[in-house]
Image (spheres, rainbow, N blue to C red):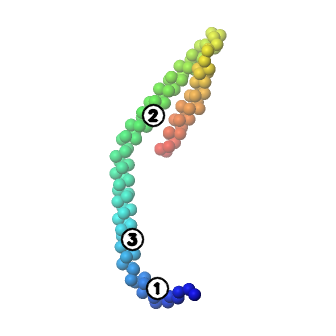
Amino acid sequence: MPVMITTAQVDELGAAIAGLVEAEQQAKQKFDAEVTSYQETCSDALRQPLGDYHAELATKLDELETLLRRGVDLQSAARANGVKLPSKVPGLCGHLITHVVEQARRILGSADA
């Protein structure tokens, strides 16, 4: 048989723990405020290093594109002169620019949007 409890007993128990519930709510508010403050502090501290990292990524993507464009130019010059290159890599460079470099730029650009 289930334990029976009256409304008066519930009210009495509620009154007995009301101070504890209030203390818990206050502690949670204080904790939430401290977490928010910590996150803001970390965010501020990381802003410059993240900016530097983003700039370095952009530079490396530019360098990769420049290198891949050399392959595109090599493939074009070889084709124009009727030369069959012993490697397929220069012929893939245009696709790499489109599918890797440009896609990486789009993804990275939208990551902070």
Please tell me whether mark 1 sits on a helix, a strand or a loop: helix
Relative to 2, residue 94 above or below: above
Mark pair 1, 2: CA separation: 62 Å
Indicate which disc residue 10 carries: 1
Residue lying at 59% horizontally and 13% vertically, measured from the top left:
77
Q: Residue at x 38, y 57 (%)?
A: 36
10 or 79, which lies in front? 10
> Which label lies toward us, 1 or 3?
1
- Residue on which disc 3 sits: 25
Q: Nearer the viewer, residue 13 or 33?
A: 13
Residue 63 in the image, given as x and y percentages of width and height: 47, 26
Quadrant containing the N terminus in the rendered view = bottom right
Is 99 positioned to the left or the right of 62 in the image? right
101, above or below 73, in the image = below
Is the C-beta separation of discs 1 and 3 under 8 Å? no
Q: Residues within 10 Å of mark 3 (few under 14, many from 20)?
A: few
Q: Answer with the quarter of the image where residue 50 lies.
A: top left
| C-alpha separation, residue under disc 3 versus residue under disc 2 | 45 Å
Q: Amino acid at mark 1?
A: Val
- Look at label 2 and name its amino acid: Leu
Q: Residues within 10 Å of mark 1 (few under 14, many from 20)?
A: few
Separation of marks 1 and 3 at Cα, in angstroms: 21 Å
Q: Quadrant of residue 100?
A: top right
Residue 80 visible from this viewpoint: no
Label 2 environment density (alpha carbons within 10 Å; few <14, some 14–19, many ≥20): some
Q: Mark 2: which secondary structure? A: helix
Residue drawn at x 36%, y 70% is 26
Q: Which residue lies under the disc numbered 2?
A: 57
Residue 79: give x, y in percent of width and height: 63, 14
Query: For this view, does 60 lie left or right of residue 92?
Result: left
Tell me the residue at 52%/88% (across/down).
4
Q: Is residue 25 above or below residue 7?
A: above
